Image (cartoon, helix red, strand yellow):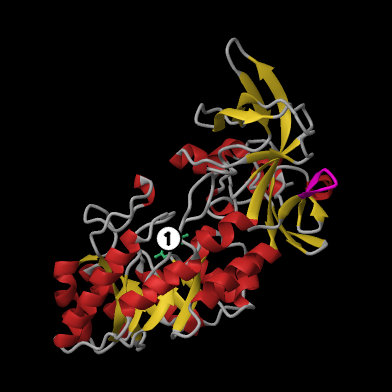
């Protein structure tokens, strides 16, 4: 469930008409509903009550400080995949002791930064990474808790670009190398092996791949314990899917029951890293119709949002429901249109042959289910300003990332001295 509904013919985020926000901030913009963020977090966390489990919100799905802060206030930890995300988690008030650092390519600088922040654990993904972390921890005279991220070789049966747990993927340590990796960690005076981790992909809509992966993790836990390693924590990753169109992903309590079943009797503390499941349906992208263009066989609705603002359709052929902000009249005639952005790429297409009620220039539309992997993937391609983000809470709203102006966008650039005869404005002397 989410909190974007028509009231008196106008689509609202909680109690705020999206029209009002558009008038205040301009378009396009992302809008998140606090009530949905909090509800989804609580439903997920409550499903694990009764077992020792910590929910680590996965920042890469939506790293806006206000969003992370919303979860931090509910007690969430954080799963981060870069020093930049770690910085955000800390800035949003997540204690270091509740932060896990994942990712296949952590640099030594990032490791040092995370050791300084006193994070809970590093999920390491290769023997080389173990060597690097050992060296960094020794040089800082610090100790690091380590979990081995295992590649369970399970097909998540999701989109090929977001499946991460089959042998051919770059992620995790192969199961047959886990013993060697564990021994290497155990041999280090600076590293402490505390657990195992898996994350097999994103937008999973079936329980079975999770179940297979967790069963393999449980078996490996027993095998490594038999070799004398203390495996006390299992990090089960994220990946639970949401409904974009007609999917029926497992509900959190069904997922949690399966987790409890697969990990029963191990006595492990559980770490869970949901991202999309919590934020996906808590956000929409609001855009304005610029033009409606009739071509020989198609009708194009050209909107002011583009692939640089919401990349998922171009990257994954992802489906986002599209709805007008003004509620369609009863019996409105829906006709198929192509919804496209202004960017100079044919891939800048949000939907083909999508049935929409009649729309005119100036109308507002929303792309639904845009809270996850939306704003975080935005770029400034075509020198378009980074898309703003707005957080609603009841009848209030706040711009939680504002739109930069052109001078700010250019401020990181400078001209070398051999081009210094350029106009003053281009040299940044505003
Ligand atoms: C991306 C990622 C997550 C979150 O995945 P969702 O599908 O958004 O739940 C969790 N853990 C790791 C290691 C990830 O890379």
Residue sitting nearer the eye, 361 or 136 = 361
Asked if one can make out residue 384 in the rendered structure from this viewpoint, the answer is yes
* Residue at the image point whose x is 37% and y is 57% from the top: 201
Residue sitting nearer the eye, 264 or 135 = 264
Residue sitting nearer the eye, 118 or 53 = 53
Q: Which residues are magenta?
A: 6-11
Identify the image quadrant of residue 200.
Answer: bottom left
Q: Which residue is identified by label 1?
A: 239
Residue 121: percent from left, percent from top: 39, 80
Residue 424: percent from left, percent from top: 70, 40
Q: Main secondary structure of the magenta part?
A: strand
* Residue at the image point whose x is 38% and y is 73% from the top: 259
Residue 21: percent from left, percent from top: 80, 50
Asked if one can make out residue 136 in the rendered structure from this viewpoint, the answer is no
Residue sitting nearer the eye, 136 or 215 = 215
Q: Is residue 167 left or right of residue 279?
A: left
Mark 1, Cα crowd under 10 Å, few <14 / some 14-19 / many 20+, is many
Q: Is mark 1 within 8 Å of ligand 1?
A: yes
* Residue at the image point whose x is 27% and y is 80% from the top: 134
- Dot 1 falls on a residue whose secondary structure is loop
Q: From the viewer's perspective, is residue 150 above or below residue 95? A: above
Q: Is residue 377 left or right of residue 179?
A: right
Q: Is residue 312 left or right of residue 66?
A: left
């Amino acid at each position: 469930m989410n909190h974007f509904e028509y009231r008196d013919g106008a689509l609202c985020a909680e109690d705020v008409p999206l029209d009002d926000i558009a008038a205040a901030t301009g378009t396009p913009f992302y809008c998140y509903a606090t009530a949905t963020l909090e509800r989804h977090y609580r439903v997920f966390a409550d499903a694990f009550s009764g077992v020792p489990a910590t929910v680590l919100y996965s920042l890469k799905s939506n790293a806006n400080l206000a969003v992370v802060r919303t979860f931090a206030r509910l007690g969430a930890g954080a799963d981060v995949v870069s020093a930049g995300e770690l910085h955000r988690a800390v800035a949003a008030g997540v204690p270091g002791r509740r932060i896990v650092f994942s990712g296949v390519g952590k640099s030594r600088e990032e490791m040092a930064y995370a050791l300084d922040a006193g994070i809970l654990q590093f999920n390491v993904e290769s023997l080389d990474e173990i060597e690097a972390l050992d060296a960094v921890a020794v040089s800082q005279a610090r100790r690091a808790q380590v979990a081995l991220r295992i590649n369970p070789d399970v097909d998540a049966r999701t989109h090929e670009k977001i499946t991460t747990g089959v042998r051919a993927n770059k992620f995790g340590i192969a199961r047959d190398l886990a013993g060697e990796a564990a021994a290497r960690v155990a041999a280090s005076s600076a590293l402490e092996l505390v657990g195992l981790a898996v994350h097999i992909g994103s937008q999973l809509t079936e329980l079975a791949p999770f179940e297979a992966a967790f069963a393999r993790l449980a078996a490996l836990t027993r095998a490594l314990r038999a070799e004398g390693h203390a495996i006390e924590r299992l990090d089960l990753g994220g990946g639970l899917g949401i409904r974009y169109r007609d999917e029926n992903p497992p509900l959190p309590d069904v997922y949690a029951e399966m987790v409890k079943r697969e990990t029963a009797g191990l006595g492990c503390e559980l770490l869970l890293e949901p991202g999309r499941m919590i934020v996906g349906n808590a956000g929409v992208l609001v855009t304005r119709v610029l033009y409606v263009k009739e071509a020989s066989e198609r009708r194009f609705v050209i909107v002011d949002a583009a692939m640089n603002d919401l990349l998922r359709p171009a990257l994954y052929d992802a489906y986002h429901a599209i709805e007008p902000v003004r509620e369609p009249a009863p019996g409105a005639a829906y006709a198929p249109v192509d919804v496209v952005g202004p960017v100079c790429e044919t891939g800048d297409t949000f939907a083909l042959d999508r049935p929409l009620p009649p729309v005119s220039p100036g109308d507002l539309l929303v792309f639904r289910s845009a809270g996850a992997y939306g704003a975080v993937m935005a770029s400034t391609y075509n020198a378009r300003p980074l898309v703003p983000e707005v957080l609603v809470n009841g009848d209030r709203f706040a711009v939680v990332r504002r739109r930069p102006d052109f001078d700010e966008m250019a401020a990181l650039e400078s001209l070398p001295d051999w081009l210094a005869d350029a106009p003053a404005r281009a040299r940044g002397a505003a």
